[in-house]
Image: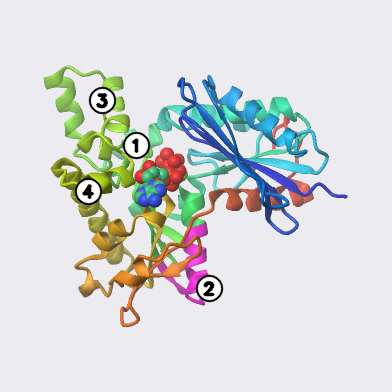
Amino acid sequence: MEPHRVLVLNSGSSSVKYQLLDMRDRTRLASGLVERIGEETSRLVHTPLAGGGAEPRERTGRIADHDEALKAAAEELAADGLGLDSPELAAIGHRVVHGGLRFSAPTVITDEVLKEIERLVPVAPLHNPANITGIRTAQALRPDLPQVAVFDTAFHTTMPEAAARYAIDVETADAHRIRRYGFHGTSHAYVSRKTAELLGKTPEEVNVIVLHLGNGASASAVAGGRCVETSMGLTPLEGLVMGTRSGDIDPAVTFHLKRVAGMSADEIDVLLNKRSGLVGLCGDNDMRVIRRRIDEGDERAALAFDIYIHRLKKYIGAYTAVLGRVDAVAFTAGVGENAAPVREAAIAGLEELGMAVDASLNSVRSSQPRLISPEYARVAVAVVPTDEELEIAEQTFALVSRGDAVSPVHSDN
Ligand SMILES: Nc1ncnc2c1ncn2[C@@H]1O[C@H](COP(=O)(O)OP(=O)(O)O)[C@@H](O)[C@H]1O
Ligand SMILES: CC(=O)OP(=O)(O)O
Ligand SMILES: [Mg+2]
């Protein structure tokens, strides 16, 4: 039998999500999450999905790093008879956050590809190092298997120069490859396609604004299936207010902090990436906790929420102008899929743009793509759950199934 399973690894700064899929019918055989890596309170939750009915298993206690996390995940899979040594495994697909200018498609990982991912660490310091550890550990566990990188930046490589360039000195920008790359591309691609499907159209027929609101958050404008604008830039710091990141800020704030507050570049980096956004504004980055605090009358939480919504609304307006005609606005990721008050507040007052939310449709909880706009609204507003893991598995399997693309792990492609 041809190998037909794909293991997907989505390594974040302090977590690893993994999924094993059978690509013959896209069933999930198992999935898991390791969180708080490096802390005393690390937790692994493994969910066996094949056969149905099995309860999730949990391990707690310190998991020192991503290497240990992945080995623990491999043990859990082995305990279900789904070990990485299986001949049914066709490939391992890795989410890689920054692919720079070079990678606009899924790529079989060679030593040379890995070096390029390493070179990009300074522009994705929270993400690329974790992705690299995931790749190395997976290579050590299965040196004979193709390992495939699926890049967050790939979908955005179609952005026109007018959107991708910063208005700074061209020679300096080019010498240091400073431009807007955009991230969460796998999610924006998947969700924009699914949104077209929900409208009964092809991706080519529709213009969609996708709002990926997770811990990291970004917006994109997708015209006829191609990304024409997105809110993240050189790094995943630009754009929307996020869980711990500031999003847009006057760049002069950074010189000011250096000159007046005596902060170093590294300290400012930590401030803007880890101590800003919702956590910086009110001490919490989890939207569930923030909503609870607002219900209890907490003013700081209410202001943090208003700042988050204000920024989101500005981007919806801006991307409406960029697209000219908008067919749909799609909310996705942890906040977008679950936080009805965020959707309601972000669309409130946008009737002139043809956008509205129906309160009862908005309160429905479901894992299915669904419309939340009233029938009369010109623009469809939708909740479209993302599935980065499925998309990575599809792209990985498509690449390794094309015979020409499969190269052994340690040669140049
Ligand atoms: N039921 C919920 N209600 C509101 N917000 C939620 C809910 N579930 C998750 N979230 C939000 O989603 C965030 C995580 O989103 P997710 O897309 O999983 O992020 P990431 O992939 O960046 O880790 C949480 O920090 C929380 O703010
Ligand atoms: C690129 C990025 O911000 O990713 P995440 O949301 O997983 O942190
Ligand atoms: Mg995410």
x and y, in percent, of residue 293 in the image: 23, 44
Residue on which disc 4 sits? 305
Report the span colored magenta.
Answer: 190-207
How far apart, in angstroms, are the residues tagged by discs 4 and 3? 23 Å
Q: Which amino acid does label 1 sit on?
A: Ala
Ranked by sequence position, the earlier of labels 4 and 2 is: 2
Q: Nearer the viewer, mark 4 or mark 3?
A: 4
Q: Is residue 133 left or right of residue 139?
A: left
How far apart, in angstroms, are the residues tagged by discs 2 and 3? 44 Å
x and y, in percent, of residue 247 in the image: 28, 42
Nearer the observer, 125 or 234 = 125
Residue farthest along the bottom direction in this orientation: 376
How far apart, in angstroms, are the residues tagged by discs 3 and 1? 21 Å
Residue 202, label in figure: 2
Q: Which of marks 4 and 2 is in front?
A: 4
Task: Report if residue 88 lies within the magenta region.
Answer: no
Among the 4 quarters of the image, the one containing residue 58: top right
SS at mark 2 in the image: loop
Ranked by sequence position, the earlier of labels 2 and 3 is: 2
Q: Which amino acid does label 4 sit on?
A: Phe
Q: In this view, does 330 lie to the left or right of 245?
A: right
Ranked by sequence position, the earlier of labels 1 and 2 is: 1
Q: Nearer the viewer, mark 4 or mark 1?
A: 4
Residue beneath the point at 39% across and 32% down: 175
Among the 4 quarters of the image, the one containing residue 169: top left
Q: Is residue 266 left or right of residue 52?
A: left
